[in-house]
Image (tube, grey):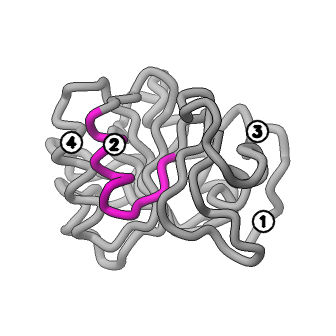
Amino acid sequence: MVRGNEGADAPQDGTRVGPQAPAGASGADPADAAARWARERVWAVVGASNARHKFGNRIYRTLRDAGYRVYAVNRTAASVEGDAAYARLVDLPEPPTVVDLVIPPGAGTLDVVRDARAAGARAVWFQPGAEDEAAMRWAESKGLAVVTDCILRRYVEQGALGRP
């Protein structure tokens, strides 16, 4: 279920982790590989909004409150939860290690993944329902790790990660 990224100390490029990973892909246990990416502390949440009932907001708040340095990416909002929001990943003040996508497939997903690479991200994390096979394949072809999992359920809310 994992392609590449079986390095001992840090995630490397070219991983797909999660339920959508191709059967028979080699590498580390998907949960271990996803957990390594989940421990990275600089994230961007594409689809973060001020609508507190939506997952983009919930993920943004949860990561921020857990001590992550997290950036909200929203094409129309100037701020999310009182923090600056950015229209594009390439506008961020620093490269995010992980870009979390909380947007529907086909809503410019491939463009977002291209921006993630241009912004210096090392991994793209697709929340459930955001998976876009063409975007995932493109990311992998460019050396980005691809994770398909729920950061909230699996890692943050269950306390699987410590504070930075």
Residue 71, horizontal then vertical, whole percent: 40, 60
Task: Report the magenta stretch's main SS.
Answer: helix
The part of the chain drawn in magenta is 134-146
Residue denoted by label 2: 137
Q: CA distance from mark 4 to mark 1?
A: 32 Å
Closer to us: 95 or 73:
95
Callout 4–callout 1 Cβ contact below 8 Å? no
Name which residue type carries label 4.
Leu
Residue denoted by label 4: 110
Check disc 3 and report its element: helix, strand or loop: loop
Residue 5 in which image quadrant = bottom right
Circle 4 packing at 10 Å, graded few (<14), some (14-19), many (20+), is some
Q: Is residue 64 part of the magenta span, yes or no? A: no
Q: Quadrant of the N terminus?
A: top right
Name which residue type carries label 3.
Glu
The circle on residue 33 is: none
Q: Earlier in the sequence, mark 4 or mark 1?
A: 4
Name which residue type carries label 2.
Arg
Residue denoted by label 3: 157
Name which residue type carries label 1.
Arg
Q: CA distance from mark 1 to mark 3?
A: 12 Å
Q: Earlier in the sequence, mark 3 or mark 2?
A: 2
Residue denoted by label 1: 163
Closer to us: 26 or 160:
26
